[in-house]
Image (tube, rainbow, N blue to C red):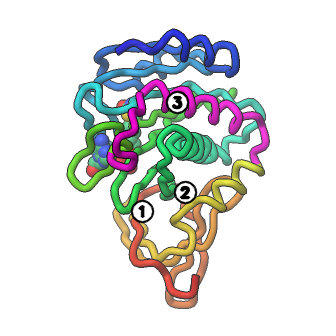
Amino acid sequence: MDIDERVRARLAAETRFRDVRWLAEVDSTNRVARDIGDPWTVVVADHQSAGRGRLGRSWEAPAGTALLLSVVLAPGGLPLQRVHLLTAAVGLAAADACAEVAGVRPALKWPNDLLVGDGKLAGILAELVTTEPLVVVVGMGLNLTAAPAGAACLSEGSPGLETTRDDVLLALLENLDRRLAGDWDGLAADYRQRCATVGREVRVEALDGTVRTGRAERIDRAGRIVVSFPPGGREEVIDAGDVHHLRVASGR
Ligand code: BT5
């Protein structure tokens, strides 16, 4: 379904997201956004035939059951080393949107998931377009009325409440607009405070397939996670790969 005119009008009046494109069917909104490439363009689709996850994985959602969007971000003043903060900004904006429109408070799992309980409500995929100037396409799939087995959707967290895709879209982009105002230290601090991975025992899978268990200590100012590994608790900054939550670490 096309995006409500009132939502488009509010976004155009109040945010930098003045060009919101809707497509019924697409391979991947990230692919389309990347091809368009103009800063602050937003692409929304009802269905993706080849939705992308990270590391070659796929994202699946039946038509009309999810918010599937990609935004072209061109955050002047953000150094490339801090690019993870864009994923953090979208995660925080989406979590705040879920709270505002549906009363659901998802947890943020580093680097790119929103969880309700143990179920994945949303996933984020950031893809670098250019480094100078820094342009990044950030896509998100957020389950509204259906979810794969073991995953979560927004409607089950707020039974009886009629939350539409456009309510979530508007709230998300309004929050994202504020998050991108240039206070990168404030953004990192907010993400550090809200990230549910911090303080937990985690299994870290590196891109080369190495698997280790450690404790997530903190988020650094670039949005990366710092994990301590036994024996001795030597700390390492983790920049990429997968992090899985294990049991809650003792002492916190
Ligand atoms: C992600 O990857 O979580 C990033 C997903 C980004 C999807 C959006 S949709 C709009 C935009 N356009 C695109 O083409 N992509 C973005 P990752 O962390 O790799 O997680 C992928 C894994 O999540 C899959 O391997 C499945 O196990 C699981 N998964 C797939 N579909 C899901 C869904 N609808 N809900 C919950 N989990 C899902």
Q: Which residue is identified by label 3?
A: 137
Quadrant housing residue 140: top left
The image position of residue 127, as x and y in percent, is 49, 35
Q: Which residues are magenta?
A: 156-184
Q: Residue at x 55, y 26 (%)?
A: 170
First in residue order: circle 2 vs circle 3: 3
Decide: few, some or many residues near mark 1? Use Cα within 10 Å; few <14, some 14-19, many ≥20.
some
Residue type highlighted by circle 2: Asp
First in residue order: circle 3 vs circle 1: 3
- Mark 3 or 1: the one toward you: 3
Q: Residue at x 35, y 41 (%)?
A: 160
The magenta stretch spans residue 246: no
Distance from Cα at disc 3 to Cα at disc 1: 23 Å
Decide: few, some or many residues near mark 2? Use Cα within 10 Å; few <14, some 14-19, many ≥20.
some
In the depicted view, which residue is nearer to us: 96 or 89?
Answer: 96
Residue type highlighted by circle 3: Val
Distance from Cα at disc 2 to Cα at disc 3: 18 Å
